[in-house]
Structures are given as C-alpha cells and as structure tokens.
Image: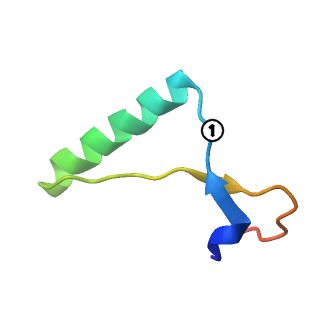
Amino acid sequence: METQDYAIAALEPEQLDELRTMERRLSERAGHPISLVAYEAAPGSTDSD
C-alpha cells in the first residue's frame, strides 16, 4: 500500500461512533489500547487492496 493511493476517510458522525465502539471492544479484548484508522482510495487510484 503506497500512501499516495489513499487518504484519511471522511466519515459521518455515526460511522465515527461505530469505529470508536470497535476500538473500545478490541482494546478490552486485547488488554491494551487499540487504534483504528480509516482510509479510502484516493481519487484516480487503481489499487484495490
């Protein structure tokens, strides 16, 4: 994954809440903080990873 092919995703408030819930659940299971980062394909990107 090359960083120029992706940008930080623009998420709706509900999507951010869902991401935070997932972070909290994963952190509880792992026993340490987990951070999730949402990326989206940059315009014109052809990479489908």
In the picture, the quarter occupied by the N terminus is: bottom right
Amino acid type of the residue tagged 1 in the rendering: Ala
Corner quadrant of residue 32:
bottom left
Dot 1 crowding, Cα within 10 Å, few <14, some 14–19, many 20+: few
Q: Residue at x 76, y 57 (%)?
A: 42
Image coordinates of residue 14 in percent, x first then y, are 52, 23
**Residue that extends furthest to the top in the rendered view of this protein:** 14
- Would residue 49 be seen by someone viewing this image from the given angle? no
Image coordinates of residue 40 in percent, x first then y, are 67, 53
**Residue that extends furthest to the bottom in the rendered view of this protein:** 2
Foreground of the two, 27 or 37: 37
**Residue that extends furthest to the left in the rendered view of this protein:** 31
Residue designated by label 1: 10
Foreground of the two, 44 or 47: 44
Image coordinates of residue 12 in percent, x first then y, are 59, 27
In the picture, the quarter occupied by the C terminus is: bottom right
Q: Residue at x 72, y 67 (%)?
A: 5
Foreground of the two, 29 or 5: 5
Residue 21 shown left or right of residue 43 in the figure: left
Q: Residue at x 47, y 32 (%)?
A: 16
Quick check: 49 above or below 31? below
